[in-house]
Amino acid sequence: MRVLFFAAAVAIASLATPVQAQGQRTLYNQDRLAELLYANRSESLDAIPDVSYRYHTLDHESGNSILARHELYQEVGGGDARYGRDQLNGMVAFLNGVFIQDLRQGDTIVLPSEVGLDPRAYSPFPRDYAGARDFDKLFVIDKTVQAWAGYENGRLARWGLVSTGAEGSETPNGRFNFNWKERHRVSTLSPPGESWDMRWVFNFHDRRGIHVHQYYALPTSGAASHGCVRLMTADAQWIYDWADGWRTVNGGADRAMASRGRILEQGTTVIVQGEAPDGAPDRFEDANGRPALIRVDLPDDPYSVEPGTDQQVRFDRLRAQQASR
């Protein structure tokens, strides 16, 4: 019996497009995916219910995998297969697994007790982060679960999946700040004659050019980038508008590199932690015969995380001087 934790496998059927690119991979309609994911956004974090998880084995008396998947959709949709499939589609970017064409009779997946909730219901990050209450905004990347979270005064505002740097080009751990941003940037690692386009780019390590950005494929396969942090389109756009960049003598966060000048004020704090898995990350663990979501542990104090660049070291020194006055 294969155990395939609930994820993209049950969700992508209606999102696939015939477009092929970069190694002939199938692309997916990320705009449609975003509509499904955020259709039930809750105004109140406290109103979002807790969910539990259970195992589900695809098992149809005919032995037909297609009918087994259809039966799953009916179960989730309370008899309405299309509604059930759409509800599962709405959670694809937040969970890990295989694509629907890979699901077959006998596979065991993990299902939540409720579907179609605000995505924060399924978050591996805590909804309340006491250590971040003094931060108007805090951005966290956890490489172990390959996910990100945005906090506002310690309250979870949004979260999503990432693909961080692969072995040999790992995304650096530590404490950083968002710096400059660009709507469109061509990667300096583009091979001769090719243009690797990155959109909704927000840098957090200026010297090394490490940033978050949109990626054409859904980030479900684990750490695979050249060091930067890949995001689905809707998440990259949200972060681009939400986070604050640095303020320099010569202007704001989207000034050209050569004209930035001295940094007057840092941007939104960024924490990068954990170790990237070999392959797709585990998002669930077995707990006495039931699946349990793997939870992310966050530092008690974000400032206790080692500074990742000289910029952080300098501003740490300034904060210490101001605190001693």
Image: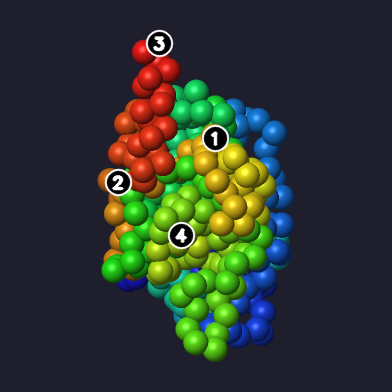
Question: CA gap, disc 3 to disc 4?
Answer: 35 Å
| Residue 28: mark | none
Question: CA gap, disc 2 to disc 3?
Answer: 51 Å
Q: Nearer the viewer, mark 1 or mark 4?
A: 1
Which residue corresponds to the image point at 65% horizontal and 44% vertical from the top-left? 251
- Residue at which label 4 appears: 209
Q: Secondary structure at mark 1?
A: strand
Q: Residues within 10 Å of mark 4 (few under 14, many from 20)?
A: few
Question: CA gap, disc 1 to disc 3?
Answer: 20 Å
- Residue at which label 1 appears: 264
Closer to the camera in the image, 141 or 318 = 318
Q: Secondary structure at mark 2?
A: strand
Q: Secondary structure at mark 4?
A: loop
Closer to the camera in the image, 179 or 298 = 179
- Residue at which label 3 appears: 325
- Residue at which label 2 appears: 287
Type of the residue with mark 3: Arg
Q: Residue furthest top?
A: 325
Which is more N-terminal, label 1 or label 2?
1
Q: Secondary structure at mark 3?
A: loop
Which is more N-terminal, label 3 or label 2?
2
